[in-house]
Each structure stands twice: as structure tokens, then as C-alpha cells.
Amino acid sequence: MQLRPLTTAGTMLLTVLLFVSGGITHAHNITKILAKHPEYSTFNHYLSLTHLSSEVNRRTTITICAVDNAAMDELLSKHLSINTIKNIISLHVLLDYFGAKKLHQITNGTALAATMFQATGTAPGSAGFVNITDLKGGKVGFGAENNGGTLSAYFVKSVEEIPYNISVIQISKLLPSDVAEAPTPSPSKQNLTAIMSKHGCAVFAETLLKSDAEKTYMDSLDGGLTVFCPLDDAFKAFLPKYKNLTAAGKTALLEYHGVPVYQPLATLKSNNGLLNTLATDGANKYDFTVQNEGEEVTLKTKITTAKITDTLIDEEPLAIYAINKVLLPSELFKGATLSSSPAPAPAPRPDGAADAPAQPKKKGKKAKAAPADSDIEAPADSPDDAADQTPDHNGAVRFDGATSFIVAAAASFLGFLVM
Ligand SMILES: *[C@@H]1O[C@H](CO)[C@@H](O)[C@H](O)[C@H]1NC(C)=O
Ligand SMILES: *[C@@H]1O[C@H](CO)[C@@H](O)[C@H](O)[C@H]1NC(C)=O
Ligand SMILES: *[C@@H]1O[C@H](CO)[C@@H](O)[C@H](O)[C@H]1NC(C)=O
Ligand SMILES: *[C@@H]1O[C@H](CO)[C@@H](O)[C@H](O)[C@H]1NC(C)=O
Ligand SMILES: *[C@@H]1O[C@H](CO)[C@@H](O)[C@H](O)[C@H]1NC(C)=O
Ligand SMILES: *[C@@H]1O[C@H](CO)[C@@H](O)[C@H](O)[C@H]1NC(C)=O
């Protein structure tokens, strides 16, 4: 209690210091941080192998609960699939900053932290939350929230702290979680249309099921596939135009919404540029441009600008995102009005779809899917959510929001240079 004013003052000072130096320093690199500590080399290896490392590097206000090689060997002896290992490790990435000091000063002695497992949208209910509790004698316990309140691991030591960007701590063992350890279906067994239907893209899914394009999708699944499926309102409004297309045109339109490469959101955000689609046959045909607008990812054809509003699934080699508009290729809709404005202006669109709100509306069953940009749902606060709200855990939150915007803008610019 006595430390509280000091902590607040310290936080404010740090925020000012970070702000002043913000333009010069680089973001963290978790692979590099852990490479200095060979006792976590297995954990580090799997963080990279599952691509969680790039997601960690993209974020600030984050805590990695690393375990030593012995604890990882125990996990590996279970011979789980890489996707299952990804779920387990993502449960050990907390979407808040917990340095050693904060761990020992948790308000009310206990807290629930949202994890990256929660952010992937694959964790049902509270399975993506970790309970952190201050115990007697200065011990700090950790437990997966769905594990009946059992605190199964303990804080060992702080490995590296970059306040308030990233804290790497060691905990005594991996947190057991039946949900995270559940086997994930192999990609070729995934039912794409069922996933789409469950998350607000039923009209697109039904249309796909009736088309040859479905086979094209299934055929490229094992090698990597990213699908951008228009939400129901948008695709319903487009149906009259779709029905007007020739059979070949219909297939091309549907194939235009699939990309034969696995593209996690972090990759889409960092590598802006042209993407070929399943409809591409030869150079500069049926492609579109990926471009960041701040923290949002937009897809631009010569006619439409659509926005990613939700991640339905992201498990290598498959990613499915919901988008707010139907992508209209200029190859099929030559006569349509060009929309040159990159901003989501309220002007009428060729596809007749109304502009969707920046954040996906949570209606009915859709509420289960984690929105791509806000990453988590209640009860805990995520750094991204908190960025445009009043910070309630530390003063650095507001700064994080502004900085990630600058970093994202710089990343887009660099992306163009690389092209
Ligand atoms: C924290 O992260 C931001 C954004 O990535 C970066 O600009 C800043 O330099 C980092 N702070 C430190 C102390 O590394
Ligand atoms: C992070 O560090 C590793 C090891 O030093 C390096 O191979 C990797 O390219 C770095 N990643 C980024 C994004 O700089
Ligand atoms: C701490 O406990 C009090 C009383 O139970 C409660 O009102 C308050 O919301 C709690 N604070 C947090 C941060 O959980
Ligand atoms: C965390 O678990 C402990 C007991 O295992 C429980 O007493 C506490 O209420 C839990 N904390 C939260 C925030 O749910
Ligand atoms: C996939 O789900 C759809 C419902 O969206 C169903 O009609 C179809 O039969 C399923 N396909 C397979 C292979 O299970
Ligand atoms: C369908 O095509 C015809 C002939 O090209 C055109 O006149 C009509 O406006 C189109 N209808 C829609 C809904 O696009």
C-alpha cells in the first residue's frame, strides 16, 4: 500500500521517458531476448515454430511465462500436434504487463489475465484466461482458469523486463489445460463452410457449397489457404449481381476470395502489397492489394475497399477472416464506378453494402468469435482495447496506442519500399 504513490510516479516518469525516446528505439524481439538464456531454448524454438514469436513482437504490454527445457521436454513427450502445442504456448502469453514487482503487488491479491490463446478465438468460455494469485511467503501462483481454480505453477524469476512493453518471466512448469491440450483437427479435415456459417458468413458459405470453387478451396487447404469471407449483410446485398454472372464468372468471383498461402494477421499487417488469389491465372489478374489503415487491414481492388472485421480461424495452414464488403475484381465488373477514396467514406458502394462499423457488432452467436482487432472479450482488459479508453492499470497504456499507430504507419511505408 505504501509503495503505491511511488509506483504511480515511477510509471508517469517512465511514460515521459519512453515518449521522449520513442522515435529512436526498436521494438522488442522475443527470439533474441530468449536466445541469451539457453535454459529456455526449447520454449524459444517452439515460440518461433508456431509463429507466436512474430505475434509477440508485434505487441506491447505483454508478458511471456517461459518454462525451462525440462518442463518443455515433458510436454514434447506427449507427441502433440504443432497446432496443439501452439494453443498450449499461447496460453503462456499474457496480454498485460506483469513485471516481478507488479506480480507481488496485485490489487486484492488475485487477477485474471487474458492470454493469446483467448485472442485466437479458439478458446471457449474462460479457457483463455490465467489466474494469478499472490500467496503467503511472497509466492505467486499461476493456473489456467478452466482448471478448477488450481494454481499449478509458481513464479520462479524475472528473465527480462522492458517496462511496460514486454516482461519475460520463468514459471515452474507449463499450465495444464484440457482445453488447450485438446487435439486440433488436421487442416484437411476442417470444414471451411461450417466455420464460416458459424461466424456470420453463412450466405457466402452456402454459395460456395453450390459451386466448383469449393473444390479449389479444399484442394489448396493442405498447402496453405487464407479466405476472406464477406459477412452476410454484404453478400446478401450482392446476390442479385452474383446471379447475373456467367458460370465461369461465379466461380472466379468465389475463388477471388481465397488466397493460396497461409497469411496470419501479423503477416498481413507487416507485408502490405499485392496478393494473388485462387482465381489468378497469369500475371496481374484477379489480384488485390493489402494495405494497413492504422491498426486495421484493408483489401483494395480497383473497385472496392473491404476491411477485415474478424478472425474466424487462424491455425497454420488455414486462416479465415470476415470482411465487411464483397471484393469486386475489375476483370468481372469493368463498368462499375471506381471508388478512389481509401477511407471508408459513407458514399454509396457498387456492391450496395452499407459501411460496417469499425468494430464488428456482437450479435447473438457471433459474440463467441474474438474480433480480429480488439483481440479479446470481457472480463479482462486487453492492451489494444485499453488504448482508446481510460487506462486503468498503468499510465503507459495511452502511450502504447499512439506508438503502435506510428509503428504500424512506418511498417506500411517500409512495406511499400520493399515492394
Ligand atoms: C516499447 O515499444 C515501442 C513500440 O514498439 C517502442 O517504440 C519503444 O521503443 C519500446 N520501448 C522500449 C523501452 O524498448
Ligand atoms: C529476431 O531475432 C532473431 C535472432 O536474433 C533473428 O533471427 C530474427 O530475424 C529477428 N526478428 C526480427 C523481426 O527482427
Ligand atoms: C478488490 O476487491 C474489492 C472488494 O471486494 C472490489 O470492490 C474491487 O473491485 C476489487 N478490485 C479489483 C481490481 O479486482
Ligand atoms: C484465482 O484462484 C484462487 C484459488 O485458486 C481464487 O481464490 C481466486 O478467486 C481466483 N481469482 C480470480 C480473479 O478469479
Ligand atoms: C460441412 O458443413 C456444411 C454445413 O455448413 C455441410 O453441409 C457439409 O456437408 C459439411 N461437409 C463435410 C465434408 O462434412
Ligand atoms: C444484369 O445484367 C444485365 C445485362 O448485362 C444488366 O442490364 C442488369 O442491370 C444486371 N443486373 C444486375 C442486378 O446487376
Image (spheres, rainbow, N blue to C red):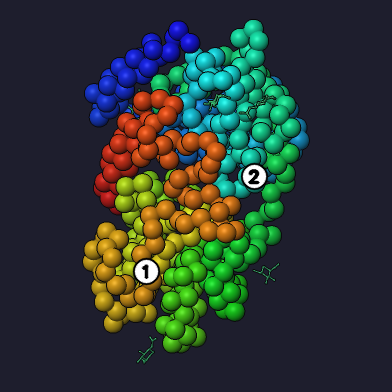
Q: Secondary structure at mark 1?
A: loop
Disc ID at residue 125: 2
Q: Amino acid at mark 2?
A: Gly
Which of 372/51 is in front?
372
Instruction: Estimate the x, y position of residue 167 in percent, counting from the top left.
Output: 48, 23
In which quadrant of the rendered view does residue 274 lie?
bottom left
User: Which residue is pictured at 64% across the width and 7% down the height?
Assistant: 137
- Residue 143, compared with residue 194, is above or below; it is above
Q: Secondary structure at mark 2?
A: loop
Disc ID at residue 265: none
- Residue 287, compared with residue 139, is above or below; it is below
Which of 347/182 is in front?
347
- Residue 79, compared with residue 24, is above or below; it is below
Q: Specify whether tag 1 is near ligand 6 (CB below 8 Å).
A: no
Q: Amino acid at mark 1?
A: Ala
Q: Locate residue 198 relative to residue 308 in the image: left or right.
A: right
Which residue in the protein does label 1 denote? 354
Q: Is residue 262 visible?
A: no
Q: Locate residue 82 relative to residue 263 in the image: left or right.
A: right
User: Which residue is pictured at 36% across the width and 27% down the height?
Assistant: 396
Label 2 vs 1, first from the N-terminus: 2
In which quadrant of the rendered view does residue 59 lie?
top left
Q: Is residue 333 visible?
A: yes
User: Which residue is pictured at 63% across the width and 64% down the height?
Assistant: 194
Q: Specify whether tag 2 is near ligand 4 (CB below 8 Å).
A: no
